[in-house]
Image (spheres, rainbow, N blue to C red):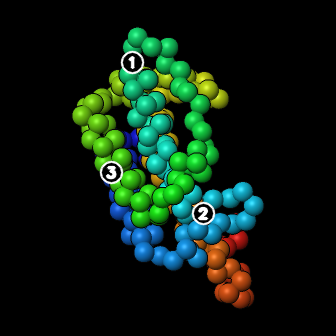
């Protein structure tokens, strides 16, 4: 599918509701467990999504739109959530994510982006030149990837319990 802002908004607008419905009110056994090692729990993922809303997507979009700047993106701290989420409950994070996402999407819609905007570029610290279209596509897929990650981590809490059916449950084999 070719990028279409309206189609991306279909996902970006729904993500907070999907995650709230999935995670709100669950026990810590579902939300605070990870896949072992330095992997993330659903709680950690929520913190990461909030940090992205605060420091990444709209900030980078605005850098691209700033014709007077050098268009260089700051590096993104993929692990900032571990400090920023301290002392917060999962419900705090779900509410915070919903609030920030709503504000960001209102700002995005107010820009009334057109096709020429989508081809404008910024400079990513690792990838070099990237287009606004690529940034917005990535924001959309990032939501889907982390939603999938949350579901996978939760499913793995029962990996041993499903017994021989593990053979048929791809989500438990990754």
Where on the picture, by quarter, is residue 63? top left
Q: What residue does disc 3 label?
A: 99
Neighbourhood count class around disc 1 (C-alpha, 10 Å): few under 14, some 14–19, many 20 upward = few
Tell me: 50 left or right of 123.
Answer: left
Q: Secondary structure at mark 2?
A: loop
* Lower position in the chain sequence, tag 2 or tag 1: 2
Q: Residue furthest front?
A: 87
Task: Using the image, determine if residue 133 lies above or below residue 145.
Answer: above
Tell me: 165 left or right of 122.
Answer: right
Q: Secondary structure at mark 3?
A: helix
Q: Are marks 2 and 3 in contact (CB under 8 Å)?
A: no
The residue lying at 71 percent from left, 83 percent from top is 160
Q: What residue does disc 1 label?
A: 66
Q: What residue does disc 2 label?
A: 41
The location of residue 121, given as percent across then percent down, is 47, 22
The location of residue 62, given as percent across then percent down, is 39, 26
* Lower position in the chain sequence, tag 2 or tag 3: 2
Task: Using the image, determine if residue 5 lies above or below residue 170.
Answer: above
């Amino acid at each position: 599918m070719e990028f279409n802002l309206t189609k991306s908004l279909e996902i970006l607008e729904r993500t907070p509701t999907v995650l709230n419905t999935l995670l709100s009110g669950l026990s810590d056994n579902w939300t605070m467990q990870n896949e072992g090692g330095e992997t993330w729990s659903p709680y950690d993922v929520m913190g990461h999504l909030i940090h992205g809303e605060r420091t990444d997507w709209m900030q980078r979009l605005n850098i691209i739109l700033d014709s007077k700047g050098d268009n260089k993106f700051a590096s993104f701290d993929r692990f900032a959530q571990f400090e920023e989420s301290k002392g917060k409950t999962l419900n705090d994070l779900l509410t915070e994510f919903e609030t920030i996402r709503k504000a960001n999407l209102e700002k995005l819609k107010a820009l009334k982006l057109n096709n020429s905007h989508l081809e404008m570029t910024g400079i990513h610290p690792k990838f070099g030149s990237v287009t606004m279209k690529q940034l917005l596509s990535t924001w959309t897929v990032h939501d889907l990837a982390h939603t999938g990650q949350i579901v996978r981590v939760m499913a793995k809490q029962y990996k041993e319990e499903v017994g021989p059916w593990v053979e048929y449950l791809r989500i438990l084999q990754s």
